[in-house]
Image: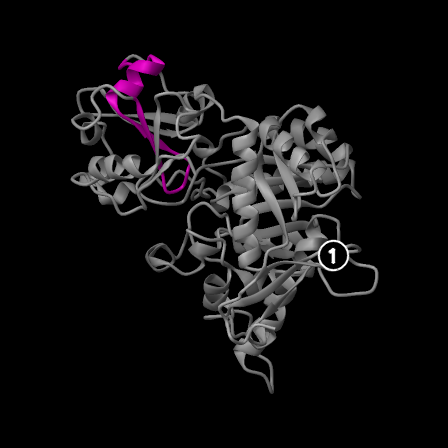
Amino acid sequence: MSEVDIGSDSTAATIAENIKRGQTTCACSQAHFRGDWLIANFYAGQNFPDGKMDRKYLDDTFPEQPVLVRDVSCHNVALNTAALKRVGYGADVEDPPGGKYMRRPDGQLTGELVEAASAEVLASLPQPPVPFVKEALIYGIKMSHKFGITSLQEASANTLYLHALRELDNEGRLDMQVFPHIVHAPESFAQERAQHIDARFVKFWMDGAPIPPHFSQCDIGADGLPNEDRLLLTFEELFSALTKHDARGLTCKIHCAGDGSARRALDVLERVRQSNPSGPVHELAHCNAIHQDDISRMAELRITAEMSPAIFHDTNLTANYPHIFKWPFKELQDAGVHVTVGSDWFLTDTPDLFPALSAVVERFGTQAGKTTKEIGGAKICRIITLAGAEAVGKASEMGSIETGKKANFIAVDRDLSRGEFSGAKVLKTWFEGRVVWEDTNNTASI
């Protein structure tokens, strides 16, 4: 809401002008809470010469104002020269563990900060005030209602976010059931609960993002072991943290973009289960590249497979890198793994899941007397409703229309159980028995 949206198709020739044009349209009252920093979203490395973003594409237009541009994965950022000077980064800066400062052939910084290299810069930016965060949350909630969403997992929350949620809930304006995940933060964060906020969740990142040009995910090597250079946490670091959170009953979500990071996470979870067999159900996100040998392990260890981001279920990435984007829905379900779907809503203009679901609906196998769409439709309907509630331990309160459960449900313009997700429209959304969104322009609205 206060950052410049430039889409993801900018090139070396257009990115600075796109940012400048977007800057002139950002005139909201909170536009300057970042001080004089200009934040823009997004750039895609493959759109630049040799797949390399460089500060020179920003410097002529922004010679003095610090500029930060996130890449499409939000794992990496690009800074102009003014921004590098602001944070004190020069050619002598050393790569941090799990990160990299991209360099030109002469050793000078390009301005692109990969993975953990961006952490210090992002943490140093001026933080928005709580009223602004509340405004942003209300916008997100209303947009979610439009696409039939009444509960969500926030995969990366902090204290500011939780304060805003609590205030909205106390004001009676939080028309959404929220399950925020604290990023491996102090245990006290887990105590921030309210009527519609349940913060019994912790988030870990095991590796980077499986997209060009950096492909910073952790793969399995020829020796069958994860590539240690791509892991952001050691075995012992993850084991120590998971053991602590598991013992307290906190569900942990572990970002695993490669089959190597997934294997390492499962190795650690296997040891955690040995000491606490009945501990909480944990999750692996994003499960795009689970190795076949590890699928049965997920079932044995009671690990949920969160298949996200949905936008990647069927894109040119899926076609060009099938070894990375396997999306083994059928294999996971056949093995008895609990499967959910996530939007990872920041890559797309809206959190609409229906287009992505239409791309995978026919991947659930065959059955006599039914079309593949009908088979997949029934399974997906459960995945996006009751399975999601089960994943957060709330199946007794939500996820299906039953006596005694919360009246959170939607009306759609077609029978989704028949697999007809393509073009589907939400007509009405109810939250706790109240209509919170209605398509007043649709003549079929009920």
Segment colored magenta: 66-91
Q: Residues within 10 Å of mark 1 (few under 14, many from 20)?
A: many
Q: Is residue 81 left or right of residue 345?
A: left
Asked if residue 81 is positioned above or below residue 45 in the image, the reply reads above
The quarter of the rendered structure image containing the N terminus is: top left
Q: Is residue 402 left or right of residue 111?
A: right
Residue 361 versus residue 24 in the image, above or below = below
Residue in the picture at 50% in, 40% down: 225
Based on the displayed image, in which of its 4 quarters is residue 383 positioned?
bottom right
| Residue 62 within the magenta-colored segment of the rendering | no
Quadrant of res 247: top right
Q: Position of residue 107 (x, y in %)?
A: 22, 19
Q: Residue at x 83, y 64 (%)?
A: 403
Where does residue 72 sit, x and y in percent of width and height? 37, 42
Q: Nearer the viewer, residue 416 or 186?
A: 416
268 or 49, which lies in front?
49
Q: Could you tell me if residue 137 is visible in this image?
A: yes
Q: Amino acid at mark 1?
A: Met
Total marks shown come to: 1
In this rendering, the answer to whether 341 lies above or below 128 is below
Q: Which residue is mark 1?
A: 398
Of residues 56 and 17, the one nearer the viewer is 17
